[in-house]
Amino acid sequence: MMNMLIGIDVGGTFTDGALFSDASVVHSVKHPTDENDLAATLLGVLDELLKHAETKGVRRIVLSTTLVTNLLATGKGERTALLLLPGSGMPFSAYSISPDTYFLKGGIDFRGRQIEPTDKKEIEEALRQIEKTGIERVAVAGKFSNRNDSHEKLVMEMIKDLYPHMDVCISNEIAGRLNFPRRAVTCYYTAMTIRQWNAFADGIEAAVRGRVPGCELHILKADGGTTTLEASRRRPCETVFSGPAASAMGTVALNREPLNCVSVDIGGTTSDVCLLIDGQPLYASKGALIGGHLTHIHSFAVNSVAIGGDSAVYEESGELRVGPMRNGVAACFGGASPAVTDAFNILEDLKLGDIQASRTKLEIVAGRLNLQLEDICRKVADIVTEKLKESIVYMFSQWESEPAYKVWEVVHQRKFVLHHVIGIGAAAPAIVPMLAKKLGVTHILHRYSPVANALGAALARPTLAVEVHVDTQRRAYTASPGGLSGPVEDRNYQMKDARKLAERLLREISGERGLSAYADDARVYLEEQFNVIRGYQQTGKLFDVGIQIAPGFIHEYKGVEQ
Amino acid sequence: MKPTGVIFFPAFDWAISPTHPEREERLLYTRDQLFEEGIMDMPEVREYHPRLATAKEVSRVHFCVPDVESRVTQAHMVSAGCAMVMADSFMQKEVKNAFAIIRPPGHHAMTVVHGNRGFCDINNEAVMVEYLRRTYGIKRLAIVDTDVHHGDGSQEIFWHDPDVLFISFHQDGRTLYPGSGFTDELGGPLAYGTTINIPMAPKTTDTGIHYIMDNLVLPILEEFKPELVINSAGQDNHYSDPLANMSFTAQGYAVLNQKLRPDIAVLEGGYSVETALPYINMGIIMAMAGIDFSNLREPDYNPSRFKESPGNMDYIRALIDRQLENFRGREAVVEANRKKGREFDSYSRSIFYDTNYLQEEQRLDLRMCPDCCGFRRISSSCVHASGRQYSIYGICLPMACCPTCGERARSDYDEMKKKAGYNYIYLQDRVRDEYRTFDCGSAEETVL
């Protein structure tokens, strides 16, 4: 028997779990989520799955949780001070991130040169203030720290020296891309959640080790890849929005053709729309938006529409209304009032649950509006499919109108040509066929689509992206993640050398994070080279290389049994 | 409050030559600065996607010899396209104002295009102006060119257009390319006084330029009452620019834009890629978007470094008086010119293309129409970089011309097609929005 894989997706309302082996789902579980005790919910689902597995056979468990998302959304993270070194540029008032923000002197430019030195006295004074307020978490972020993080490191060392009880994060170690406000926010959120995440991780790790010794334990990230629980301890923020990521990866796992698709995950009151370009889910170009701030967290572009299978159908001032609220489940499943699913049930003769209940409850609303049952069902269907279509068309146009910085990109204008609509979620079979008809394409409903999220978690492989910036004039490189830097000695440095450097760093980091098995799957996704010319003479070269283990599936996954 | 529209098109895959000032690196550090500041994420800013200009849009302004496709690089087509994206965003009221941070530049490109002049193939602002007129019915516009080099291309294109006020600030033409832009260059006989040149002494500072803004440019704009103000936003007045000798700062540029309040700004030159461009571009966006720019400065900025000399201030004051008088007396001059009774006003000139080392010979006629601004006929010849000589004849019919000029221009075009001695005959009929090219060799006509 093949080793078993487990995926558990803790959602806002329900927690789904799937046990996968030999190309099929052996068992799946759905439990209500207890927001106050996520660990208990998780373990409850795990225990039920383990009953159906031979304990020794479970090789890997992947968890997707809402812990960090919830901490940030509800403002229950710990009070955290933010030390900013913005130098010249935007006004300080542009950085309204933390109520406990301290501005420090110190400026770096885009080449990593110091423009303005730091002021130790000023730093000491800020730290004294922080200590006085009783804050124990500190995030430090400097503009262009990704090109030179000596200022951030100096502040970190001072904190470690003067106040060893404080936890400190510096932005360049968390996220090395350009965009100072996003780096500052990501670092701030990391500092804010790191202790609670670690406490949660300790509990889960002990519980899992007790039940399934020797099993790999991974966490699903927003980018649809996994990371080991151990590696997640320094970057808890990467675990946000893993729910939509689980469902996107599940969609891809069930539909592995490289086509342009739109996946519609229809839940109770909302539907998540996601684009797949050549079979790959589309990322949010600006990073995840958390608490009103953009971050450097790579996450899928998901558009939520306030309509789902349970959205109520009712009459209000002589008009037909659909949603956005929900009055329990649809009538056919025993609900007290009619919902979207009931209308589709009749229209498409889906024979879902008690179709007579759908009919009876909808006839009451139809009566109030002086409409035939058939007409009201058609109207509901129109409203629902039109809203979803609007959202899909909007996502196409967003993708097509992303900024472009090269002539080639403009000449070869993107155009989204849709092939399929993929339905996910319990209400998808009711709504998706008609939506696809409206868009003029075919639809796909997989038998495993109700557990696609848990399956996506179970099968996702680790991801890792490394970006290297080489400045041969300054004879130095910087790299992310982790705030790496080093010298560049070779005077005849070329793109192939920069690529080699990126590959080497990716291997090293993969090793540290326990992802070595996937390092061979890494592909270069960014290559830029600029000549530095001063007075008609070349004085150096700048290289940017990005290499990544992209989202995908573990090696042993070869598809599901048809 | 509506945001400021920004399009950032650095053309990272295009250069005139590897070490040329117009090379891939030019907006690299500006990219780094804009991205690192996160200004595109601010609610005050909305970023747009570039597009290609069409051959027809370019033909509204230029006679590209032999045609648009073979004469104009794709990079220039995107640059002009970007300017029009900004025009759309502004006219459709999606934004309160708009800034195209684009390369390659355009303000040295003239009506006839045989090659690249001053890094420009086609004139981005002029293509945008004719697009605004055609698409949105805008009639009266002002272009304020704040590039350190005289905007000789824009001046030439709008020389006979009384509805476009062209004002150019620049370093004195006796000391810098292209060597024109003196105070006596005031526009054609029927558009006299709507071209205003402000040649400045080398080393002029923020103080001097702001004084000119307050006392000459803003009053003239107030009197001209344009429907739209365009800033041809070159950034090479900066103290660190390697190709010029002025003493302007990033703060100075931001304040200038705060005073001018352009509806649309379009980047032109500026070649101090590290010390100036990242900061000036930030400054202009911030000024246009209403973001406080007091914390913006160059790494080596020192507020006490540049002091305006009393002698230069005297020169500036005299310059302002002269140009105010020229501007305010313009209608009388145009009236007098009209009464001279000649049917055509003719002149000849040579035009040098520095990038390609070409010399063009031109002869121009302007119909001295009693009812409108007249139409132009241009005969031009030039030996191209390929070694081939081209002789062309082009007729430009402005949108605002009278029916008599329209008929005359079209019949002149038909007459010219029968004549020998030219390779191509062009008709730029902006009234009908129709652009004809007659290939005298094959006797084939194309219409855009």
Image (spheres, rainbow, N blue to C red):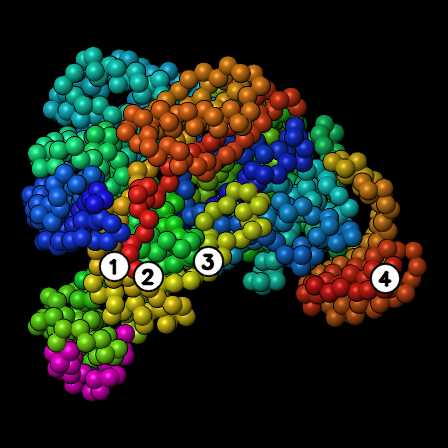
Q: Are marks 3 and 1 on the same chain?
A: yes
Number of the front mark, 3 or 2: 2
Q: Residue B265's image quarter?
A: top right
Query: Residue at coordinates 90% horizontally, 65% vertically from top-left?
Result: B418
Q: Secondary structure at mark 4?
A: loop
* Label 2 packing within 10 angstroms: few (<14), some (14-19), many (20+): many
> With respect to residue A386, does A5 lie above or below?
above
Q: Amino acid at mark 2?
A: Ile
Q: Amino acid at mark 4?
A: Ser
The residue at which mark 2 appears reads as: A422
Q: Taking B21 as reference, is A203 left or right?
A: left
| Residue A362 among those drawn in magenta | yes
Q: Which residues are magenta?
A: A355-381
Q: Cβ–Cβ below 8 Å for labels 2 and 1?
A: yes
Query: Residue at coordinates 22% horizontally, 48% vertically from top-left?
Result: A21
Q: Amino acid at mark 3?
A: Phe
* Label 3 packing within 10 angstroms: few (<14), some (14-19), many (20+): some
Q: Are marks 3 and 2 on the same chain?
A: yes
The residue at which mark 4 appears reads as: B442
| Residue A290 among those drawn in magenta | no
- Residue A2: image location, x then y, percent: 23, 44
Number of the front mark, 3 or 1: 1
The CA span between labels 4 and 2 is: 56 Å
The CA span between labels 4 and 1 is: 65 Å
The residue at which mark 1 appears reads as: A449
Q: Amino acid at mark 1?
A: Ser
Query: Residue at coordinates 44% horizontally, 37% vertically from top-left?
Result: A523
Q: Closer to the N terminus: mark 3 or mark 1?
A: 3
